Image: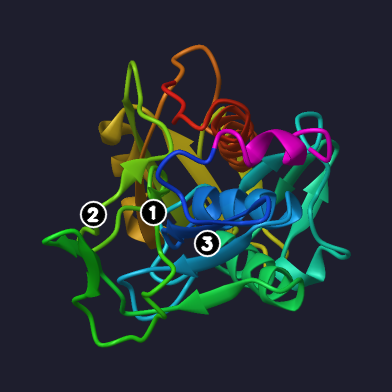
Amino acid sequence: MHLVRPLLAKLSGGCLVHGDVIVIVVVGSGLVAVSAAHQLLDAGHEVSLTTAHAEFGFPHGGCGLWNTDLLPWPLATLEEAVAAASGSLVTCRSQWLVKRLVHLFTAAGGRTSTRVRLKRNAGVWVSVGTGTLPLDDIRHIIIADQDVAEPASSDGAALFTFVSPVQWYGAVVTNRTPMNFEHAGVRADGSIEAWTKNQHDLATVQRTSLETLQMVWEDEDHALDAARCVQRAHEAVEDFLMSNGLATA
């Protein structure tokens, strides 16, 4: 990433540039958004992470299954996200994983704001929500809500789009629930998180369901995985930094 920075001053386009620093707002409340914001911050830019939700991480329908064969676990301990590991599979409360990553983002110098919607009005950015965000320096807004949809939209450019979107259905069930899901893991509290592309599969665990989840993702050939969501966000940001364009999946 450090090799990219000298190139950015030449590739600034419509972004505001302070030296080789681009002021960027990332919109989203899930893993994709906070991962993209981290990546941009690490590249040396001023980054604000915003969402129209009341808080980051909640409500969150994203996947809590993390494959360490794809990416290392991003927190110092499993306890930070109420997680448990079995081989290369970590099963966590995705809401707490997002919150901990947002904490790390702000500790590294990133800014956050909730209840914010950003709209372009006669060439000027305005905030529609009740949250606050400095608007004078905004020149580029990236919508990174591909894993967790915003309750109300902001203007901006999508971090990436799906070629073949796939609807996934998830459930969190009590620890003694008999089940036959290939894509499932046990959390630290003993509850089980399971995902399927067939919504009818969840009927078998309906009586002991603690939470139901839904998420759109791509790639029919791979199981839904939180690490893959973060990996895709990193790839899209690298494409953006190198080309000043936005990645298309």
**Magenta region:** 1-11
Label 1: how many Cα within 10 Å (few below 14, some 14–19, many 20+): many
Q: Of the two numbered discs 3 and 1 on the same chain, state the one appearing first in sequence.
A: 1
Residue receiving disc 3: 174
The x and y percentages for residue 191 are: 59, 61
- Residue at 85% over, 37% down: 87
Residue type at numbered disc 1: Ile
Q: Residue 115 appears at what percent x and percent y?
A: 31, 79
Element type at mark 2: loop
Q: Residue at x 37, y 52 (%)?
A: 213
Amino acid type of the residue tagged 2 in the rendering: Asp
Magenta region, main secondary structure: loop
Write down the quadrant of residue 51 in the picture: bottom left
Residue 196: % across, % down: 41, 32
Residues at badges 2 and 1 in contact (C-beta under 8 Å)? yes
Query: Going by the picture, which residue comes out furthest to the left?
Result: 122
Quadrant including the C terminus: top left
Report the Cα–Cα distance between label 2 and label 1. Answer: 8 Å
- Identify the residue under disc 1: 141
Which residue is the site of mark 2?
A: 155
Work out whether 113 lies above or below 124.
below
Question: Which residue is found at the position 55% from the left and 25% from the top?
Answer: 243
Does the magenta segment cover residue 75?
Answer: no
